[in-house]
Image (cartoon, rainbow, N blue to C red):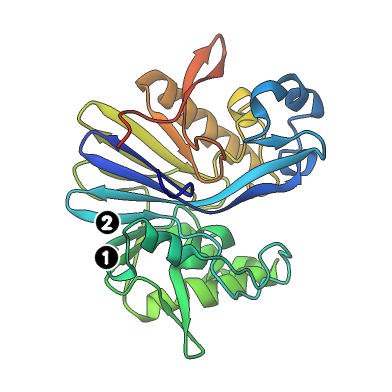
């Protein structure tokens, strides 16, 4: 494709477009997935580097990206990245972040007014920041014609009813106030729990642990299957060892259980797995390997 930040595949009757906001080495592997151990990264260096790991500095490579789905006549965004100009004092990497997210979307043929639905897989800074834009000093929805699907459990936890995450991190209050509350004020927020059918091809499913309301989006169309897993997976090493959580998982036992359940189904039903932060091809098939899992082919089906 002309723009290296874009990648398209077709799954059944759904077009899937990947728009990358930023990609690069971000955090030491031992901090990123603490339980994985250096030996697991080293043993898989041949394929982890360079798309998922920079061995020289021992840094995990991370992509910040949005999946754009064209399904049943609608344009749908899965997560919206970091967003520009945010106050994130507890997250130095994202504090006053500046990127060209909306520009990347427009170059991919998606104008803000074209978006019909935004899916936030969970309420973390790098998944809801692009929900809004600064308009004359006021945060307003970036996509004026869209409904925003937000997990009810996350909206409660990170919002005022949950004490902005019980006040554990000031960033939680800030991200809710600049990236979620404005969507509520505009009447564009739709809260859901358990499961939520979007259309004949797409269904949201709760997969808690990473956050209280963490969710996955399932695609089933024309014999093709895929699952957008959000932050259940931060690195491919977690496919090899599903018990290993990222440093960002809030309930480690629940996150590991959700991860195992999603990977088992993906392997058994041949679902393409599309995490929020994988570099490289960004999507991978998962196979059973004895009592565990192995990585199958990278990428998708039927390139556009």
Identify the residue shown where x is 18% and y is 42%: 200
Identify the residue shown where x is 65% and y is 76%: 87
* Location of residue 179 in the rendering, given as x and y in whole percent from the top left corner: 50, 72
258 horizontally vs 31: left or right: left
Q: Are marks 1 and 2 in contact (CB under 8 Å)?
A: yes
> Which element is circle 1 on?
helix
> Which element is circle 2 on?
strand
| Residue 8 makes an appearance in the image | yes
Picture quarter with the N terminus? top left
Residue 257 in the image: above or below residue 86? above
Q: Earlier in the sequence, mark 1 or mark 2?
A: 2
Q: How many marks?
A: 2
* Location of residue 218 in the rendering, given as x and y in whole percent from the top left corner: 34, 39
- Quadrant for residue 118, please give it: bottom left
The crowd level at tag 1 (other Cα within 10 Å; few <14, some 14-19, many 20+) is: some
Picture quarter with the C terminus? top left
211 horizontally vs 244: left or right: left
List the single residue furthest toward the front. Answer: 2
**Which labelled disc corresponds to residue 114?**
1
Q: Between residues 274 and 244, which one lies in front from this camera angle?
A: 274
Residue to which mark 2 is pinned = 75
Residue 44 in the image: above or below residue 222? above
10 horizontally vs 260: left or right: left
Q: Between residues 236 and 101, which one lies in front from this camera angle?
A: 101
Residue 201 in the image: above or below residue 295? below
Identify the residue shown where x is 66% and y is 65%: 94
| Residue 150 makes an appearance in the image | no
């Amino acid at each position: 494709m002309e723009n290296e930040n874009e990648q398209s595949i077709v799954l059944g009757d759904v077009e899937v477009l990947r728009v990358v906001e930023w990609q690069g080495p971000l955090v030491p592997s031992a901090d990123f997935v603490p339980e994985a151990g250096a030996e697991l990264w080293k043993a898989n260096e041949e394929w982890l580097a360079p798309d998922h790991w920079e061995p020289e500095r021992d840094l995990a490579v991370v992509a910040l990206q949005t999946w754009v789905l064209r399904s049943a006549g609608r344009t749908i965004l899965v997560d919206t990245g970091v967003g520009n100009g945010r106050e994130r004092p507890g997250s130095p990497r994202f504090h006053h972040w500046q990127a060209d997210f909306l520009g990347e979307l427009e170059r991919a043929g998606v104008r803000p007014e074209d978006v019909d639905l935004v899916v936030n897989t969970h309420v973390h800074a790098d998944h809801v920041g692009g929900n809004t834009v600064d308009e004359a000093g006021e945060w307003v929805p970036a996509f004026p014609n869209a409904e925003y699907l937000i997990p009810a459990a996350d909206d409660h936890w990170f919002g005022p009813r949950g004490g902005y995450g019980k006040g554990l991190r000031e960033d939680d209050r800030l991200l809710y106030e600049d990236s979620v509350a404005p969507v509520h004020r505009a009447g564009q927020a739709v809260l859901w729990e358990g499961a939520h059918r979007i259309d004949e091809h797409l269904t949201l499913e709760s997969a808690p642990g990473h956050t209280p309301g963490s969710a996955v989006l399932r695609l089933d169309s024309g014999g093709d299957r895929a699952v957008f897993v959000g932050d259940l997976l931060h690195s491919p090493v977690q496919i090899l060892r599903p018990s290993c959580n990222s440093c960002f998982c809030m309930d480690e036992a629940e996150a590991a259980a959700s991860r195992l359940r999603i990977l088992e189904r993906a392997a058994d039903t041949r679902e393409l797995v599309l995490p929020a932060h994988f570099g490289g091809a960004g999507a991978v098939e998962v196979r059973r390997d004895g009592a565990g899992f192995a990585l199958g082919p990278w990428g998708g089906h039927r390139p556009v």
